[in-house]
Image (tube, grey):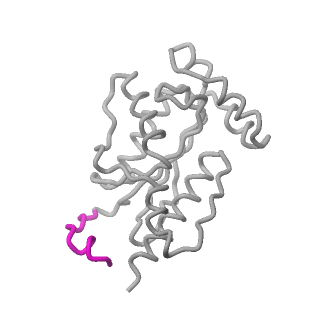
Amino acid sequence: MNNLENNLPKRQLDGRFTDIMIDLETLDTKDSTAILSIAAQAFNIETGEVCPDNFYATLNYERQIQEGRTISVDTMLWWGNQSEEAKAEAFGGNKPLWEALIELRRYFNKYCYTDRHVWAKAPAFDLSALKHAYDQLEQEPYWDYSNERDVRTYLWSAVNLIAQTEDKATHISKQDVANQIGQVCHVYQLINRK
């Protein structure tokens, strides 16, 4: 364990996971974006243990657009260059956004420790878009901003320990979440070797 972590109080675990990874696929780069899919998976960065249950929802983007969420031409063109598998997965959803957000909150509450770290690549996009969606539903996000963690920054901080962490982004959010958890846990183990 490094010196910084020695000085931090250990979180008391209640049998649930300490961390959660979030990934979105969207139709815009603004916070107001229509969301195609939401994936989340709880994990414990210290042990590398990953929750066997994950959260995954593919959403009805047309309804979101009718309700004022946004799309951009550039993002639509970008999607045109993605794999057929990614496009089929992203554009095949029918769940209403409000329903997915309620289910995501339930997943957090069931599997995650109250003072969980919420990871994304990057929080300034994924978590901001989720916060905007919750605001639109007049609900508060269920994590504190001080617990947001950035996968890119974390991986970059260990650049001298690892040759390169391969980015295996598939743009299928449930696959990207699993890949990002593996990267973060790997770097944590390298940083905290005894």
Could you say which is closer to the camera, residue 155 or residue 131? Answer: 155
| Residue 156 x/y as whole percent | 48, 62
Image height of 5 relative to 137, above or below = below
Task: Give the residue at x 38% y 60%.
Answer: 17
Query: Where, quadrant-wise, is the N terminus in this rendering?
Result: bottom left
**Magenta residues, start to end:** 1-13
Q: Is residue 38 magenta?
A: no
Task: Give the residue at x 28% y 44%.
Answer: 144
Task: Give the residue at x 69% y 31%.
Answer: 91
Q: Is residue 190 left or right of residue 147?
A: right
Q: Which image quarter: residue 29?
A: top right
| Residue 98 x/y as whole percent | 46, 26
Going by the picture, which residue comes out furthest to the front? Answer: 160
Q: Is residue 11 magenta?
A: yes
Q: Is residue 5 left or right of residue 156?
A: left
Image height of 130 relative to 159, above or below = above
Please tell me whether the stretch drawn in magenta is mainly helix, strand or loop: loop
Could you say which is closer to the camera, residue 24 or residue 39? Answer: 24
Q: Is residue 161 left or right of residue 175?
A: left
Query: Where, quadrant-wise, is the C terminus in this rendering?
Result: bottom left
